[in-house]
DNA sequence: CCGCATCCTTCAAGATACTG
DNA sequence: CAGTATCTTGAAGGATGCGG
């Protein structure tokens, strides 16, 4: 068959066929806030109001919802102190840390190539396509 | 687990503050199909109808839309042959390959922990059986 | 065979106000 | 302080038909 590069071999067999898995993880961390919340917990436990400030832009509703889902999935832990005033802290579980570790490359990729993509997007119609035989671009 | 300090150091400072970057990449690959399409192109160029079968579940509209966006962002290339019948092939660009490489850890994480998350999610079902004693933790 | 255009449905997410 | 409840919207996504 085709000889795969070494880099490809390192990642093993790509689960291209397992669209199911990909979809599962995307539905989880691909939603608007989950990954951001997880990322903000990378350096220790935070309380609700603190996260509300850190994520900045998230509504109380979405923060509560996101935290609830992440807790339910076992990615973060919730600790409530019966004090006055009330205090609740959230922290990454070991599983949550592994997720973060796996997501870091993607985040770094985003930081590195964000500008390039933005430029490409602005050149909405690159006239100089590949020099291919009889290429007919249909508007 | 095995949270290696080296891994943490390698990722440097987590761009938790750069929610913007994270949002950008999530808006791109976090949509329903982009990553799946990219993953399916990992082993070479594919034509439209072939992708339509591979991704399976995607509508023509979404495939066209996704391919268009990815092409515009410079992640995949589009090659149209003016033949009869028409033929169009899509392939990863070098940039697209770097994205795929960065996404692989996440995909592998999904495959590895998919079951665990599913179990965790199922265990939080107050409606299934009530009156469960103990479990005074969290909430 | 490729893929764009139109219509329609659903649901995630924001705003706001209220409670324990 | 840490949520919950309700309303509303807008974008994503599916179905279908046409056009090159």
Image: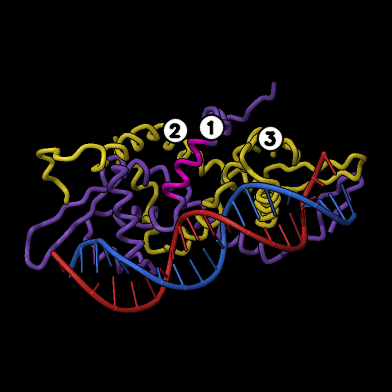
Chain colours: A purple, B yellow, C red, D blue
For disc 3, the chain is B
Q: Residues within 10 Å of mark 3 (few under 14, many from 20)?
A: few
Q: Is B51 positioned to the left or the right of A79 in the image?
A: right
| Foreground label between 1 and 3 | 3
**Does dot 1 land on a helix, a strand or a loop?**
loop
Q: Which residue is mark 3?
A: B53
Question: Decide: marks 1, 2 in contact (CB < 8 A)?
Answer: yes
Q: Which quadrant of the rendered structure holds the N terminus of chain B?
A: top left
Give the mark, 3 or 2, whose residue is nearer the N terminus.
3
Q: CA distance from mark 3 to mark 2?
A: 22 Å
Q: Residue furthest left?
A: A83
Q: Which residues are magenta?
A: A20-29
Question: Decide: marks 1, 3 in contact (CB < 8 A)?
Answer: no
Q: Which residue is mark 1?
A: A18
Foreground of the two, C15 or A83? C15
Expressed as whole percent of the image width and height from the top left, the position of residue A68 reads 29, 52
Q: Which residue is mark 2?
A: B111
**Does dot 2 land on a helix, a strand or a loop?**
helix
Q: Residue at x 36, y 42 (%)?
A: B7
Q: CA distance from mark 1 to mark 3?
A: 14 Å
Q: Residue at x 66, y 25 (%)?
A: A3
Expressed as whole percent of the image width and height from the top left, the position of residue A105 reads 46, 46
Q: CA distance from mark 1 to mark 2?
A: 9 Å
Q: Residue at x 32, y 61 (%)?
A: A63
């Amino acid at each position: 068959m085709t000889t795969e590069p070494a880099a490809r071999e390192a990642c093993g067999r790509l689960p291209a066929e397992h669209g199911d898995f990909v979809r599962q993880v995307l539905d989880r961390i691909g939603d608007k806030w989950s990954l951001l919340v997880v990322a903000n917990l990378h350096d220790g436990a935070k309380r609700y109001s603190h996260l509300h400030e850190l994520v900045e832009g998230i509504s109380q509703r979405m923060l509560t919802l996101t935290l609830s889902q992440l807790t339910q999935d076992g990615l973060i832990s919730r600790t409530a102190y019966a004090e006055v005033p009330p205090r609740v802290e959230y922290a990454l579980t070991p599983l949550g840390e592994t997720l973060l570790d796996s997501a870091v490359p993607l985040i770094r990729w985003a930081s590195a190539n964000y500008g390039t993509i933005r430029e490409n997007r602005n050149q909405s119609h690159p006239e100089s396509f590949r020099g291919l035989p009889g290429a007919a671009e249909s508007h």
